[in-house]
Amino acid sequence: MPSLFSCTENCKFLNQCFSHGVFSREELLEKIREVSSQIDEIQGQIDKITSEINAKKALLNDIRKQLAEVRSLIDGKRNQLQKTRETIGSLVERKSQIISQIGNLKNELVQINITIQKYKEKIVVYRNLLSTLNEYIGGKTLEKEKLRRIIEQLEYFFETSPTNPEWERQFIKYISQIEKELNIVDSIEKIRTHIAALKNQVDEYKNRREAIRNEIARLAQDLALVKQELANLKASRQEIYKELAELKKKRDELKRKREEIKEEILQLAVKRKELREKKRAIQEELEKYSILLKALELAERNKARSQIKAITEQSLKERAEILYNKLLNGERLTHDEIKILIEAGYLPEE
């Protein structure tokens, strides 16, 4: 980490320490060890908090994944609920249609029964009329073609026979009687034909009535199936409501946990920031002690060099004095000995 102190601050700090003789080398080393230990301890706390933050971030990511899954499930359930509602709506409409169809068919059935009853009443009337006509002719079986032939023969005989007023009256009366019987036969045939036609119409209405009853029975079965399916869908809808409520509850719980963890991470980050600031402050203190130690070591080295230099100079002076005395006594000196005299200032440099 770069120093946070300017050169001026360092110089002032060093001057104060040296001028007051604040720390010895051993004390500085002890201080450095103590401060380094504090830094290591704080760094351990920072590392521990960082591990906690990373663990909580991993947990936060897991919760976010769970939230995404729950939200996806909620969307799926909402789509399922919408489809169920649409199906229920269609079935309710189908149910109403079936009930309406059954109602219309029942109304038609009532009208058919009324019509059949009216036709039966008409048949009774015609049968009573037929019975009256049969009683009138004495229960005889009259043949229409035979009666016509008799009338034709009598008319021919009347036209070709001699004239007799009394006989003519009797003859005309007899012909009128036969014609009356012929008219009765015609009426009986018409009545029977009408009765047959009424019976055919009654049979047609009965067939229609039976078809309607079968259709009503079929529609009733369809209605029962629709009602059962509606009941099943409504039960399914309630189950979906329940599942949705549980999923929303789980979603809210996950959101609450997410916010709690985010708050915990924030608090840990604040604490880690405080520790880092504290560490930087202690590192600044360590840097001061390190600078002071280096300055002290430099001063000690300079002092040692000065002492060595002084000793060397004293030794050189003593040696030069001996050599100089030898030179004065006329003794011959070596080149190295002459250099010593020059260095000691006894001889001028060449």
Image (cartoon, helix red, strand yellow):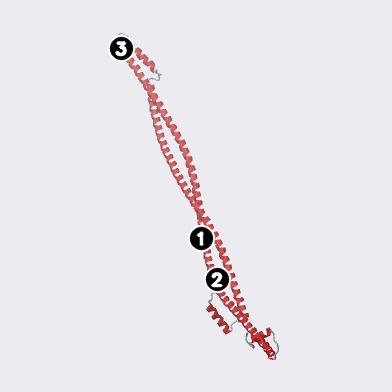
Circle 3 sits in a helix, a strand or a loop, which is it? helix
Q: Residue furthest bottom?
A: 329
Q: Earlier in the sequence, mark 1 or mark 3?
A: 3
Q: Quadrant of the N terminus?
A: bottom right
| Mark 1 vs mark 3, CA separation in Å | 126 Å
Q: Residue under circle 3? A: 168
Q: Nearer the viewer, mark 2 or mark 3?
A: 2
Does any portion of residue 310 appear in the rendered image?
A: no
Describe the element under mark 2 as helix, strand or loop.
helix
Q: CA distance from mark 2 to mark 1?
A: 31 Å
Q: Amino acid at mark 2?
A: Arg
- Is residue 124 left or right of 75 when viewed as pictured? left
The residue at which mark 1 appears reads as: 255
Does residue 293 appear left or right of residue 259 in this picture?
right
Q: Residue 193 location, x and y as percent?
A: 39, 24
Rendering coords of residue 341 (x, y %) = 66, 86
From this viewpoint, which residue is outermost toward the top? 162
> Residue sitting at 53 percent across and 77 percent down?
7
Disc 1 vs disc 3: which is toward the camera? 1
Query: What distance separates the C-alpha of mark 2 from that of mark 3?
Result: 156 Å
Using the image, determine if residue 213 lies above or below residue 37.
Answer: above
* Amino acid residing under circle 3: Glu
Name the residue rendered at 64%, 86% in the picture.
Answer: 342
| Residue assigned mark 2 | 276
| Total tally of numbered discs in the picture | 3
Q: Which amino acid type corresponds to the residue marked 1 in the rendered image?
A: Lys
Q: Quadrant of the C terminus?
A: bottom right
Would you say the residues marked 2 and 3 are in contact, meaning their CB atoms lie under 8 Å apart? Answer: no
* Relative image position of residue 256 (x, y in whole percent): 51, 61
Whichever of callouts 2 and 1 sits on the residue coming sooner in the sequence is 1
